Amino acid sequence: MRMVDLILKKRNGGELNEEEIRFIIEGFTNETIPDYQMSALSMAIYFNGMTEKETAALTMEMVKSGDVIDLSNIQGKKVDKHSTGGVGDKISLIVAPLVASIGIPVAKMSGRGLGHTGGTIDKLESFPGFNVELTEEQFTKQVNDIKMSIIGQTGNLTPADKRLYALRDVTATVDSIPLIASSIMSKKIAAGADSIVLDVKTGSGAFMKSFDDAKALAEEMVAIGKNVGRQTVAVITDMDQPLGFEIGNANEVKEAIEVLSGKDVNDLKTIALTIAGHMAVLGEFYPTFDEAYADLEKRMADGHALEVFRQFVAAQGGDASLVDDLSKLPQAKYETTFVAKQAGYVESIIADEVGVAAMLLGAGRATKDDQLDFAAGITLEKKVGDKVEAGDVIAVLRSNKEDMTSALERMDHAYTIGATEPEARPLVHAVIQ
Ligand code: URA
């Protein structure tokens, strides 16, 4: 087989078979296929797409390129969740203890944040002493004991995806639906889950800005799941403004704990219950989603999920007393307010811009090696649809850096205040299963 013939086949709109895709991914991983040929193939895929069969084969070959986490020593059906990322997205911190509290094991690997979106692992490190690097034995034991663990990625998972993603990034081939879908699904499958719930975001703060693109990505990932024997449900949720009121690491931990303590933060609660509901159905705890949603809503604030969260923090070396005394979370030295220049309604909030403002305060990384300021973040006082008077506080910015001018400029760009009360967008746009 020659790579040039396979590029030609794809360029001319043909379908690659499993053997050909194996040849490509094995060759690319062991570096017998050079980057320039893989770039040409990626561009051919970008223009001609891939069939369901091709996308499934590509996903599984990327899984096979590295380690696959063995969760077979964990009792019960393992259901994972994945979010395509957004601003203020602390859903995992709510959903994981909630689902674990009914006995479904949550053995989760999460990532760090880069750019305007945060990462769950970074947020958890707001607890002094929290350890995100457990051995496989510690990880398995903890999930069997308390039903929940969240750690950083271990082992050499999907090296083919890592190389391909880096190449796509510099060859204008990132935004190809089959390439994104296979990239995300290969990592979830290698992480060992039996079933997967995907939270595909749409709106100004999302990777997929339009609903149609989000739906196409969701459908493609659900199809991969079906073709490779992993039950997959995708929920398309709104990311047209930040989720909840808190952005930043300690800020988001605090808000997640508040929701688990019964605070009614509408968007967080609705989306968390939707994701948790589908996880609980896939985990075979409830027969239907409606029953799952209704029962989990009652359980959310009855203290059980919060108790699992306490045990989880303590088990991974963090100071669990912070769960009951949020003032002990990292606190910033400086604080400033962003105020309304005019009266009116908050018509829109560009979520990305709020994410960048939080990053500039120290809550996120502009480059991989940046150090985080766990206390840095933004508390929103006003969200889309709220009425404001000139001089009202719209948001409070906190940081250990005294100069917050550039973050304030970003906030100014993020918020549009106008005369018209905007129509509310749905929080859950669609469910694909
Ligand atoms: N996230 C991924 O993991 N892969 C992509 O290709 C795009 C976003």
Image (tube, rainbow, N blue to C red):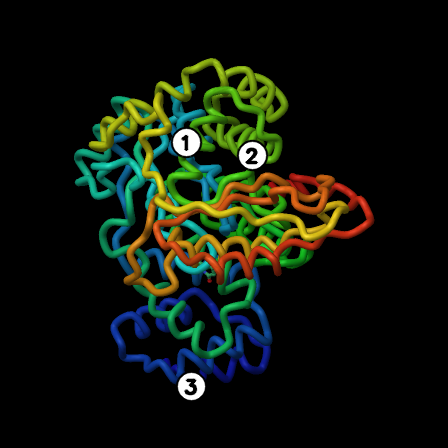
As drawn, 383 above or below 215: above
Label 2, secondary structure: give it. helix
- On the image, the x and y values in percent for residue 227 come to 50, 50
Q: Is residue 106 at all visible to an observer of this figure? A: yes
- On the image, the x and y values in percent for residue 83 come to 49, 46
Q: Residues within 10 Å of mark 1 (few under 14, many from 20)?
A: many
Q: Earlier in the sequence, mark 1 or mark 2?
A: 1
Q: Disc 2 marks which amino acid?
A: Leu
Q: CA distance from mark 1 to mark 3?
A: 46 Å
User: Residue under circle 3?
Assistant: 4
- On the image, the x and y values in percent for residue 250 come to 38, 39
Going 52% across and 80% down the picture, which residue do you hit?
A: 9
In the picture, the quarter occupied by the C terminus is top right
Please state which of the two labelled residues, at mark 1 or mark 2, is closer to the viewer: 2
Q: Residues within 10 Å of mark 2 (few under 14, many from 20)?
A: many
Q: Is residue 206 at all visible to an observer of this figure? A: no
Of all residues, the one furthest to the front in this rendering is 391
| Closer to the camera in the image, 394 or 78 | 394
Q: Disc 1 marks which amino acid?
A: Ala
Q: Disc 3 marks which amino acid?
A: Val
Going 18% across and 34% down the picture, which residue do you hit?
A: 138
Disc marking residue 96:
1
Going 42% across and 32% down the picture, which residue do you hit?
A: 254
Disc marking residue 268:
2
Label 2 near label 3: C-beta < 8 Å? no
| Closer to the camera in the image, 238 or 70 | 238
Please state which of the two labelled residues, at mark 1 or mark 3, is closer to the viewer: 1
In the picture, the quarter occupied by the N terminus is bottom left
Q: Earlier in the sequence, mark 3 or mark 2?
A: 3
Q: CA distance from mark 1 to mark 2?
A: 14 Å
Please state which of the two labelled residues, at mark 3 or mark 2, is closer to the viewer: 2
